[in-house]
Image: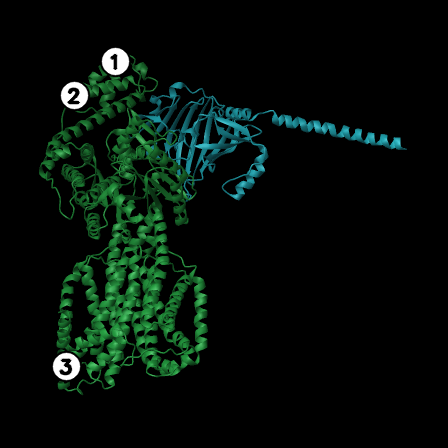
Amino acid sequence: MRKFAEFVLKFRIIIILLTVGVTLFLGYHVKDIKINSDILSYLPQNDPLVVLFNEVGDKFGGNSLAVVALEKEDTFNYETLNRVNQITQKFKSMDEISQVMSLTDILDIKKIEGGLEVGKLIDKDDIPQDSEKIRKIKEYTLSKDMYRGSLISADSKITVIIARLKENIDKITVAQQMKKIVQNTSGKEKIYYGGIPFQMVFLTDIIQADLIKLTPMVVILVMLILFCSFKSLRGIFLPLSCVLMSTIWTVGIMSLLKIPLTIASDAVPVLLIAIGSAYGIHMLSKYNEDICKGDDKIQGIKDSLSEVGIPILLAGITTLIGFLAFLSSPLGLIKEFGFFTGIGVLFAMIISVTFLPAVLSLLKVRKIKLNHHGVEDGWITRIMDKLGKFVLGKEKFIVGGCAGLMMISFLAVPHLNRNVNMINYFKKSSEIRQAEEMMENKLGGSIPVQLLVRGDLKDPFVLKEMVKLEKFLAAQPHVNDPQSIADLICEMNRVMNGHSTIPETKEEVANLWFFIEGQEILEQLINSEATEGLIQAKMGTVETKEVDVLVKAVNNYLEEKLNIDSVKIKISLASDKLAEELKKQRVEQILSKIKWDIQKRFPVFSKGGSKKVIIDDDLRKIITASIFIEKKGFDNKFIKIIETKISNYFHSEEADIQIKSKQGITIIIRDIVKKLQGESPGEEDIIAILRKNVPEILYIEEPEILEYTASSIKAIINEEERWVRANQLMGELKPLFPRSLRKDEEFLKDLRDDIWEINEDWFALASSKYSKFFNNTNEPIGNQVKLAVAQTGMPIIYMDIDRKIIQSQVFSLSIAIFLVFILLAFRLKSLIGGLISIFPIIFTILFNFTVMSIFDIPLDIVTVLISSVAVGIGIDYSIHFIFRFKVEFAKGKSELEALDKTLETTGKAIIINALSVMMGFLVLVLGNIVPMQRFGYLIALTMIISALSSITLLPALILLTKAGFIGSFDRLTKNLISNVKGKIKKGMIEGVKKITKNGS
Amino acid sequence: MKEKKFFMMIEVWVLALVMIVPSLAQEKKSEAQKKEFTALEILKKSDSVANAPKDQEIIMEMILIDKKGKQKKRGAKMLQKGSEKRMIKFLSPADVKGLAFLDLPNDMMYLYLPAFKKIRRIASHVKNTSFAGTDFTYDDMASINYADEWVPGLMESKKEIVSVSAEKEKELESKECEHYLLELKPKEGIKKDYSKLVMWVRKDNFYPARIEHYSREGKLWKIMERRKIVKEAKYWVSKETEMNDLKKEHKTKMLISEVKFDQGLKDELFSQRYLKRK
């Protein structure tokens, strides 16, 4: 080390110039540092779940949705709608936005008598002003699932404008422009901004603000601390210049490597300034000490550097280990943070042992006031004196107490809370959180739960599986508004046919599909070939536990309940045995749908509070009866309806055959009705009736019009039959439900749609079950239906991150502790020595986890860093202490004397350093990022604990074990020890007496 | 001498005058020929050319092309009588075969769903929404008389030509002189999604070859181009029409494979009854 000192002194000018040069070069690049505010980019990009999530985001545009929400007591008023319209139109005219949806720009397909009305919900050129009109539109809008909960909150207080940004654009700039547009419109509504683009703007601002606010604060703090401890300009500026330069180097290198600052690494400058000062402080205080001893300047530097150089190096390396251990983390965010803080620390250390002594050697020697020990006098020194005496007298008590605390921590640690939702990383009062909270309360949440469906989406049975999946999802607690292409098809079916179900045949689906083809909304639901579709729901909680429950429930469903491979069979063509099986399965399918629909209304929250509605068996009986028992004949009411409908048909323009005579029509209807009394007539029967009753002249030119007519009439009868069956079953089922459900119009609609399949003939049977029948009998071979569903969306990613956070914690901590142990054991040439040195830090870490557990501070992407950082920094205190203690002990002093001396010198430096680092970290509490705040105060706490434990627990352990690595304890007689102890006790008693005296 | 010179000068002047005047006159004449038509006249002529046939039966293919270049095809048969009665019946793909629209005067529109054997009336504010997933709106599909709803203005100066590519722009530039360029603004009281249209009307036959649609914010939004303009029987018809939605980055090509004019289509064909026929 002495050689190194000589080297430094020899090349001092070059060292200074080089350091300044590098600083200038890298400092120039600092200005180019970028901020990465894309939260999604923080996810581990090569993780298969993240790959899928990003893929889905790109394909369906979900990651580029910007949401503007307007809040007012009732948003259905002219002013608000007008404002929504203005914003919508302005957004639409932006080149970077590919589509905009809002109340004033959304396709609406309305059912009207005998048809449908296609148009916009609210015409942008004719925003209603009349209160009656507004009331009607409000009522209508709130009645539709498609709008309620997505474009407008159920209480109509919130309405949103959703804009989809194009790919490959600067989202931040565009989002800023959008914000400006909104701000330029006038109105009294409260505005919220949500979605990734706006979150990016917010995050960029927050990171910038934190950097600009916190960095100068920590600099000033460090300066204050340095002033208090050195009371000289050089004492302030030398260590400060070391940390500032190392910070500039680090950020400069990040900038050169084009690595942007993230929500975690934005703390690097603050951290480096806080931690890095330690090396300079140690160097300078040792130098001051040596100068006081009477060394001349050059000699002083040589002495200090050779004596304190090794501990500084060791301390630096261990800190480096603490940070570099994060490279084992699967999360890039943590890796980057660890790596750059690590190299920053390395720079600070290098600068402190090169640049600092080099500058010192050029400065004049400063006179320092001496106390009797030859060190600066001060309050810390006085405290240290007392501390030394205390430790020596109570070593067993100290060790025992710590051991007790550690036992407690083993109980507390398993209860550590975790938190992965990044929205939680912002203050409750922040814009981003407020928007989130509003979304949670009014619009069912903002966390996307997504299921990617692969299969032929134009196949009715793929769509039917999707409907089931959505019903299942909606039944899960905190999950709201699942939407997919299946809903649009159901909605089209409702408009066309009155019931919101997926039709049975491909042709029917295709007919309905035709209308929505080309609609903008499709881009968010399916790919252009309709081979991939997205089911998207919203989750309205940020609780990690709830998220976990959902992810598992969904995966469970996908693995066990989803029909991924089935065969379409017409029940009417199947053998009796197969038909029975199919019908039974249909009953179960209907039952599960009904159950989900009930659960949706009475969610079973994992935190209790569930209302159970058990109606299983009765439901099953009635539905089974409806499916199995063939109805024969029709009642009079039904026949009356049929009569009217057929008559209407014949009189309408639609009639395929124009029969002028009313008499003729009546006769035809009479004949058909006669047939109906037996069994439902087939087309052939109807043709026969027509042939008998219609004058040949009407169809002689086009004989096929008889078939058209028959087919039209058959369709009318079929349709009516289905309604009758469904309504009859509804009537039987209704009494089984509690009053609240019986009165719930929405539920009754759902119920009708659930049971509608009793009218259907096709059924999709799982291939595995099918083969059982197929092998035995001559069953019809149906078409196969295949689909695959993968869970994606934020919840599953959150759980993935959660796992990775825990992995990070375990790996980085074990690696750090292990490496530090090896390093120290090697250096001290003693395993016991290594163990004893790391003991205080293990205690500190457990203490930290206990505090986190007791105060419910969650483990998140930032707080996960604490323990390894604590190892890296905290171990320094043990190192400094042990080395000094060894040196003093080797000088032949008694334990007390050695301890006294160590505490007065190194102990003091440790406390100053811990205080200064602590203050530095506490600055983070003033920042805007919640985990960073937690990180700030927790690490401040660990600093104090590790400093205290290294000057109490550590010496207590050494004294207790009399470990050989310190030196030979044998040369001191037991007497001497007890003698000393006695003295201390006496002194203490006297002290106590003094205090009580003074007190009285 | 001087006099001689003077006369010579006069002679030269006269000569010059004699030579120049007729050419001046000629120029004046061609100017007059151009000016013969006002913008409104051009537009009306164009309307009448485009809507000339009494009735027409067209077999066509619609190709929908998305921004990735993926194509979807649809075959359809269109019957039209005058400018107000129209029926479009889809022939392919198989699963929508038979699906049909009937468009009658007074905003009466019907739709037949073969899979459900049902006719549904469509009430419309749909004029400006996409027709069956294409980039044509119902309005675009209809044969409109532009002169009824738009006020034309003749564009004097060479307009700055904007199009999808530089190549295309050059091509258009070279063709500019063959066209009247009309700028159409909506008539007062008529709400349109477009702030203006720029219509390229061919000088030789008054066929509207290209219509640029500008958004309300004044940005070029959609371009309709009629290509392969040929004379079939006595009418001009474009065999290929493309509508390009620049905002959606989506376009639709309509290719006409068969066209029959003036067959004397009966009114009866434009009825709900016939909507159901195969």
Q: Amino acid at mark 3?
A: Lys
Residue A114 in the image: state x and y as whole percent: 29, 24
Task: Examine the rendered structure and indicate whether residue A57 appears above or below residue A410.
Answer: above
Q: Secondary structure at mark 2?
A: helix
Chain ID, cyan in image: B
Which residue is tagged 1?
A: A664
Query: Considering depth in this image, is B70 or A327 the residue closer to the camera?
Result: A327
Residue farthest front in this picture: A1000
Circle 2 or circle 1, nearest the eye: 2
Residue A853 in the image: state x and y as whole percent: 18, 59
Label 2 marks a residue whose chain is A
Can residue B116 be seen in the rendering of this structure?
Answer: no
Q: Are marks 2 and 1 in contact (CB under 8 Å)?
A: no
Lower position in the chain sequence, tag 1 or tag 3: 1
Which residue is tagged 3?
A: A983
Lower position in the chain sequence, tag 2 or tag 1: 2
Task: Examine the rendered structure and indicate whether residue A532 appears above or below residue A880.
Answer: above
- Circle 1 packing at 10 Å, graded few (<14), some (14-19), many (20+), is some
Rendered image quadrant of residue A772: top left
Label 3 marks a residue whose chain is A
Q: Amino acid at mark 1?
A: Gly
Q: Amino acid at mark 2?
A: Lys
Which residue is tagged 2?
A: A637
Q: Secondary structure at mark 1?
A: helix
Circle 2 or circle 3, nearest the eye: 3
Label 1 marks a residue whose chain is A
The structure's colour scheme is by chain
Chain ID, green in image: A
- Which quadrant holds the C terminus of chain A? bottom left
In-image side of A451 versus A677 (left or right): right
Rendered image quadrant of residue A785: top left
